[in-house]
Image (tube, rainbow, N blue to C red):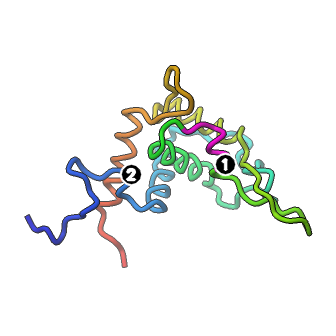
Amino acid sequence: VDKRNRNPKMSKSGATVKDAPTREFIVALAAHFKKSGKIELPAWHDLVKTGVAKELCPQDPDWYYVRAASIARKIYLRGGTGVGGLTKVYGSGYRRGVKPVHFQAASSGLIRHMLQQLEEIDLISKKKDRKGRFITRNGQRELDTIAAQIVGAPKAH
C-alpha cells in the first residue's frame, strides 16, 4: 500500500464528518437535502429573518437547506444539543445604533422547525430521559457517506 497517498485523518472504516472540511461538507449536505426532496421548504422561508439581530431575510435562496445541514452537522459532532444551545451558536451581535453591540440569540422557532424536519427524516431523534437531540444510526450513516464522497473526491485547483 502506498502510504504517501493515504489520508492520515481518515478512519479505518472510511471517512467521517470530522474528516471532511466543514464548508464543503455543509454545502454537499445541503445539496443532498435539496436534491432528495426529504426536507420541504416552509411557505414562509423567503420572508423570515434568522434572528432579531438581522435586518433582512437571507439572500441565498437555498439558505434553509444550508442551515438544516449545519444543524445536522452540529448535532453529529455534539449530541445532546438542544434548541437553546443552537440559538446561541447561530446568534449574532445586535447593532443598536450608537449604543454598544450586544449578543442576540437566533430565532428559536426556526431552529425548532428544522430540528423537527430532521427528526421526520430520521437523521436525529430525542432520547428518553435525556435533553437535546442526538444523531441516529441512519443519520450517522448518511452523513458519513457524504463525508466520504468529499474526502475521496479529487481536489480541484
What kind of secondary structure does the magenta stretch mostly adopt? helix
Q: How far apart in space, not on screen, are marks 1 and 2 (Cα)? A: 22 Å
Residue at 38 percent of width and 40 percent of height: 140
- Residue visible at 77% across and 52% down? 104
Classify 155 as above or below 43. below
Residue 85 vs 91, above or below: the answer is above
**Is label 1 in a helix, a strand or a loop?**
helix
Which residue position holds label 1?
Answer: 88
Q: Could you tell me the amino acid type at mark 2?
A: Val
Whether residue 145 is visible: yes
Of residues 144 and 36, the one drawn nearer to the viewer in this rendering:
144
Q: Residue furthest bottom?
A: 157
Residue 17 coordinates in the image, percent (x, y): 38, 51
Residue 35 magenta: no
Callout 1 amino acid: Lys
Element under disc 2:
helix
In the image, farthest residue toward the top: 128
Residue 35: in sight, yes or no? no
Of marks 1 and 2, which one's residue comes earlier in the chain? 2
- Quadrant location, the N terminus: bottom left
> Circle 2 sits on which residue?
17
- Segment colored magenta: 81-88
- Residue at the image position 38 percent from the left and 34 percent from the top: 138
Q: Which of 34 and 125 is in front in this view?
A: 125
Looking at the picture, tell me which residue is in the foreground, 133 or 24. 133
Magenta-drawn stretch contains 82: yes
Residue at (52% x, 48% y) in the render? 69
Q: Where is residue 87 in the image (x, y as percent from the top left)?
A: 67, 45
